[in-house]
Image (cartoon, rainbow, N blue to C red):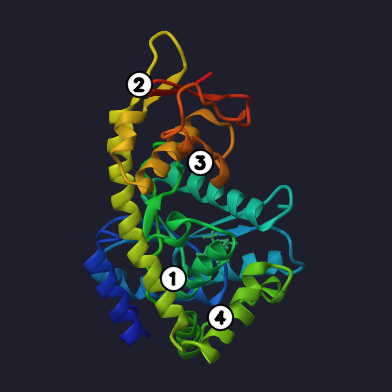
């Protein structure tokens, strides 16, 4: 613990989570993503205080999207904090202002990935909370997601799906509420850099946070955030299990045609499997052949071919591929 810090229940909670879940092993180099909001400030302060116990090498990364008039001052503030804490600071400014939240996120993760790769950080750590998890679950539920989207924010995942670079994105605060991070910053007298775009109700996520969750808390369940996060936690284990079973079934049922890029899949093997796995295998197959993510309708059409009469075929998928039934096989042309 640093000199001025005292051990609070939140320190103990994070320490316990890190131990039980083995999220950030001792002695590792950690790149902590700090926006200046209450969650990531709470995260970095807790990690700094726990550092003597774990022996990590900590650094701070801040990404300036440039989309608020106070963006540069925000970045400067984080740099000053890093200097005060004597922690290495990486500040990156977007060359072009991102057009959407999704673009901003994409750029941010790319930047974090590049820093981690070039300066040898095996872990990038973010301040996502239990409240974020609950909101993400609700957001995805309303948009019609399956269990995969509802598991909402996992504790740990590879930072980049494309590159095999062994950098992990870790979210150690998924059991800590936003109300707790706010209280912690206040108790520790940490100045929060408030993000005016967080109040903008044109962003669906903000409306879920400021209107929908409080409504659910008042009228249905005061522990709405915890309950939704718990659902996400349960679904995470179930999705892991289903994905393993899917992979096994896929490998049993699929055949790669020699001298061709075509794949064919065995209907008799798939018929033995439950619908949940049939759908997942078909999604997996479509992910191989389509240029875009498969939709629910596409997966349903392909799944229907498992029981369809011989010579049935699908409508063209994006990119032009068609699936056809030939006896015990479904193949694409
Ligand atoms: N500008 C930034 N610079 C550095 N880290 C950031 C920045 N913005 C967000 N983060 C990191 O990401 C975490 C989540 O932030 P926020 O909820 O605003 O992002 P999000 O885009 O909703 O999340 P996600 O990236 O999972 O979709 C923060 O706690 C912080 O660790």
Q: Quadrant of ligand 1?
A: bottom right
Distance in Å between CA atoms under marks 2 and 3: 19 Å
How many other residues sit within 10 Å of disc 1, few (<14), some (14-19) or many (≥20)? many
Tell me which label, 4 or 3, sits earlier in the chain.
Answer: 4
Tell me which label, 3 or 1, sits earlier in the chain.
Answer: 1
Q: Dot 1 corresponds to which residue?
A: 44
How many other residues sit within 10 Å of disc 4, few (<14), some (14-19) or many (≥20)? many
Distance in Å between CA atoms under marks 4 and 2: 47 Å
Q: Residue 29's x, y, as percent?
A: 35, 55
User: What label sits on residue 123 in the rendered view?
Assistant: none
Q: Residue 298's x, y, as percent?
A: 55, 39
Distance in Å between CA atoms under marks 1 and 2: 49 Å
Tell me which label, 1 or 4, sits earlier in the chain.
Answer: 1
Whether residue 275 is situated above or below residue 222 in the rendered picture:
above
Q: Which of 284 and 49 is in front in this view?
A: 284
Residue in view at x 63 percent, y 27 percent:
319
């Amino acid at each position: 613990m640093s000199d001025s810090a005292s051990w609070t229940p939140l320190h103990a909670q994070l320490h316990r989570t890190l131990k039980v879940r083995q999220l950030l092993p001792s002695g590792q180099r950690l790149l902590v993503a700090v926006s200046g909001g209450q969650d990531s400030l709470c995260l970095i302060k807790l990690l700094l205080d726990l550092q003597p116990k774990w022996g990590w090498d900590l650094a701070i990364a801040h990404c300036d999207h440039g989309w608020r008039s106070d963006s540069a001052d925000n970045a400067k503030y984080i740099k000053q904090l890093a200097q005060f804490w004597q922690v290495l600071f990486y500040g990156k400014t977007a060359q072009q202002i991102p057009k959407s939240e999704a673009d901003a996120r994409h750029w941010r993760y790319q930047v974090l990935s590049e820093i981690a790769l070039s300066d040898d950080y095996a872990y990038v750590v973010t301040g996502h909370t239990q409240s974020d998890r609950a909101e993400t679950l609700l957001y995805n539920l309303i948009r019609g997601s399956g269990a995969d989207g509802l598991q909402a924010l996992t504790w740990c995942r590879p930072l980049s799906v494309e590159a095999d670079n062994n950098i992990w994105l870790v979210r150690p605060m998924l059991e800590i509420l936003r109300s707790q991070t706010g209280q912690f910053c206040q108790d520790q007298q940490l100045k929060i850099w408030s993000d005016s775009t967080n109040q903008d109700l044109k962003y669906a996520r903000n409306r879920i946070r400021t209107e929908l969750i409080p409504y659910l808390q008042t009228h249905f369940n005061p522990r709405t955030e915890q309950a939704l996060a718990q659902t996400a936690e349960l679904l995470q284990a179930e999705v892991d299990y289903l994905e393993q079973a899917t992979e096994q079934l896929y490998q049993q049922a699929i055949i790669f045609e020699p001298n061709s890029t075509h794949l064919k899949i065995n209907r008799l093997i798939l018929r033995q499997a439950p619908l949940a796995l049939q759908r997942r295998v078909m999604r997996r197959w479509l992910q191989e052949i389509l240029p875009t993510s498969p939709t629910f309708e596409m997966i349903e059409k392909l799944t229907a071919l498992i029981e369809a009469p011989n010579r049935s075929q699908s409508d063209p998928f994006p990119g032009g591929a068609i699936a056809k039934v030939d006896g015990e096989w479904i193949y694409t042309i």
